Image (cartoon, rainbow, N blue to C red):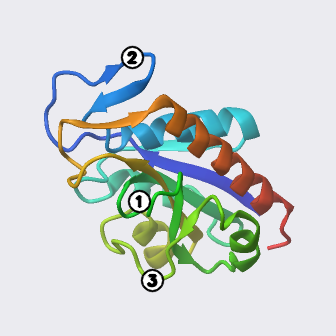
């Protein structure tokens, strides 16, 4: 079973810049925090990453990727952001699980990851394309960001949090690769 990462890079509204300093990424960080984590996890694991566009519209990027891959032989990890309050203080969240039993993963990483069992924004995320529409084994991996509105231009995420989410995603991917799916 092949594991791939999908992270969308589109920005919801026009912004002139997003600031990255030595401590944090600040501005309209929705999407970009997930892109940073997806990139780093791909580099560390060798798992392919697809950076998709148009998630904020009709999911055209996820549709294009789904049409290139075999749903019977692929697990898709959708990396995106989650509001810190929805992540309940955890450095990462897993939600919107399609056709996978992650109970053992939950036992081993439940102290680091908020596993959201009920549907979490089930139609506002690319997992609905991969998992529901195309029948992939898929789930959402959320990187916590500040703020109550994903598309606010004053949100932030620390570089430490991005790195911590990356390390957890690497653990998740390593666990997936060891499973006999």
* Of labels 3 and 1, the one closer to you: 3
Q: Residue furthest top?
A: 22
Dot 3 or dot 1: first in sequence order is: 1
Numbered label attached to residue 118: 3
Q: Quick one: quadrant of the N terminus?
A: bottom right
Residue shown at 22% from the left, 55% from the top: 148
* Of labels 3 and 2, the one closer to you: 2
Numbered label attached to residue 26: none
Picture coordinates of residue 134, whole percent (x, y) = 49, 73
Q: Secondary structure at mark 2?
A: loop
- Give the class, few, some or many, for how many residues have Cα within 10 Å of label 2's Cα (few <14, many ≥20): few
Dot 3 or dot 2: first in sequence order is: 2
Picture coordinates of residue 160, whole percent (x, y) = 53, 33
Picture coordinates of residue 6, whole percent (x, y) = 51, 50
Q: Quadrant of residue 177?
A: bottom right
How far apart marks 2 and 1 lie (CA) works out to: 34 Å
Q: Which residue is mark 1?
A: 63
User: How many marks overall?
Assistant: 3
How far apart marks 3 and 2 lie (CA) works out to: 36 Å
Picture coordinates of residue 152, whole percent (x, y) = 17, 43
Q: Quick one: quadrant of the C terminus?
A: bottom right
* Of labels 2 and 1, the one closer to you: 2
Residue shown at 29% from the left, 49% from the top: 54
- Judging depth in this view, the residue of 124 and 156 nearest the camera is 156
Q: Secondary structure at mark 1?
A: helix
- Judging depth in this view, the residue of 43 and 67 nearest the camera is 43
Q: Which residue is mark 2?
A: 21
Q: Is residue 107 left or right of residue 168?
A: right
How far apart marks 3 and 1 lie (CA) works out to: 24 Å
Relative height, residue 101 to residue 73 (above, below): below
């Amino acid at each position: 079973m092949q594991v791939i990462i999908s992270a969308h890079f589109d920005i919801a509204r026009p912004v002139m810049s997003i600031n990255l300093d030595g401590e944090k990424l600040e501005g309209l960080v929705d999407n970009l925090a997930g892109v940073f984590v997806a990139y780093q996890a791909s580099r560390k694991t060798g798992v392919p990453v697809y950076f998709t566009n148009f998630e904020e519209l009709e999911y055209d990027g996820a549709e294009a990727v789904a049409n290139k891959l075999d749903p019977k032989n692929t697990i898709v990890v959708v990396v995106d952001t989650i509001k810190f309050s929805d992540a309940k203080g955890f450095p990462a969240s897993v939600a919107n699980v399609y056709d996978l039993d992650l109970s053992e993963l939950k036992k081993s990483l439940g102290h680091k990851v908020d596993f959201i069992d009920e549907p979490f924004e089930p139609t506002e995320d690319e997992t609905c394309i991969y998992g529901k529409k195309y029948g992939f084994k898929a789930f959402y991996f959320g990187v916590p960001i500040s703020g109550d509105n994903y598309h606010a231009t004053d949100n932030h995420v620390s570089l430490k949090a991005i790195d911590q989410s990356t390390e957890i995603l690497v653990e998740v991917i390593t666990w997936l690769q060891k499973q006999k799916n």
